[in-house]
Amino acid sequence: MNYRHAYHAGNIGDVLKHVVLTRLIAYFQRKDKAFRILDTHAGTGRYDLTSEETRKTGEWQLGVGKVLASDIPPPVAELLEPWLAVVRRMNPGGELKCYPGSPCVARSLMRKSDRLTLTELHPADFKTLSELFAGDHQVKAIHLDGWLAMGSFLPPKEKRGLVLIDPAYEATDEFEKMTNAVVKGWKKWSGGSYALWYPMKDAWSIRRMHAAFKEAGLRDVLTLELNVGRSGPDTRMLGSGMTLINPPFTLADEMRVVLPWLCNVLHQGPGASWDVQQLIGE
């Protein structure tokens, strides 16, 4: 697998990830107390949809492009609005030319008391990321391996917040690295929320990760899936999933409203499906 994000900005995976991210932030902001978000594989922060990379794949047209072109029913629109509002603010002329990565989505929704820590290892991507947030006292960008960041920055001083994990899935042992980092992180900060995104192309690795979480004693684990077709190891990505540890109690019901609509709007062929499942109880 290869998921350098510049080629895939705004695609079906981003739709799922960023909708969930905005619902998590909305829940955290129900209380006045500050929180911190750690984005372990932050990328460049935002993406030019007219660039050579995005024009090469055009994946955003089958993701965020389809959502924006659709009539959204009111119950779904209410839940999508925080995400779509960020997208619209970045494209004031109405034409979709720029897409916010997770750092920009999070930063756009933060209050003055909230903080964002971004780590990125790729030198060129980190340079772009750090320049984007230069001078922003609420954001700290660090040139560091995301797996090391989880060992260094947990628990945050706020004692409240979220770890967002979306590696490139270029390495064959990426799921193993993610599993180990999450288990170690959870043992240091069992009260934090963790949101893991992954393409639905390696079912065996996903099952093994979930089995490891159960064996390690993790509690309150929710899984989400959005498939626009049937994908596998030898196909292009037609679906993605998220595993959430300590999610808001509201999230499962919200996703049961949003995911069926997204599945219908974004479907590309046989095998389109969605799923919300409590993997491990509280």
Image (cartoon, rainbow, N blue to C red):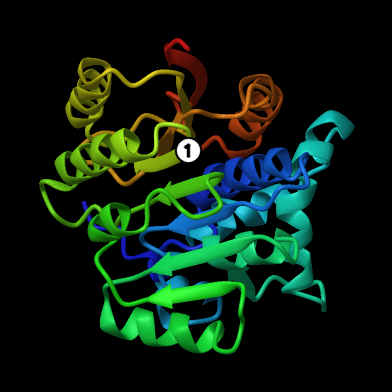
At horizontal 47% and vertical 14% (from top left) the residue drawn is: 278
One can see residue 39 in this view: yes
Q: Position of residue 136 (x, y in %)?
A: 61, 82
Q: Quadrant of residue 257?
A: top right
Question: Which x, y percent locates residue 74?
Answer: 89, 33
Vertically, is 209 above or below 171? above
Q: Quadrant of residue 111?
A: bottom right
Which residue, given by chain and number where applicable, does mark 1 sit on?
192
Picture residue at 72% right of the left edge, 59% below the top: 109
* Residue furthest to the right: 74
Left or right, 57 with respect to 18, comes to left
Q: Residue furthest left?
A: 172
Q: Position of residue 7 (x, y in %)?
A: 39, 67
Q: Secondary structure at mark 1?
A: loop
Q: Name the foreground residue: 145 vs 265.
A: 145
Mark 1, Cα crowd under 10 Å, few <14 / some 14-19 / many 20+, is many
Work out whether residue 101 can be spotted: no
Residue 84 vertical position relative to residue 282 in the rendered view, above or below: below
Which amino acid lies under the numbered mark 1 shown in the image of this protein? Gly
- Name the spot of residue 80 as percent of width and height, x first: 74, 43
Residue drawn at x 29%, y 39% as measured from the top left: 182
What is the count of numbered marks? 1
- Above or below residue 208? Residue 156 is below
Residue displayed at 45% across by 40% down:
195
The quarter holding residue 121 reads bottom left
Q: Is residue 99 left or right of residue 157?
A: right
In depth, the one of 51 and 250 nearer the eye is: 250
Residue pushed farthest top? 281
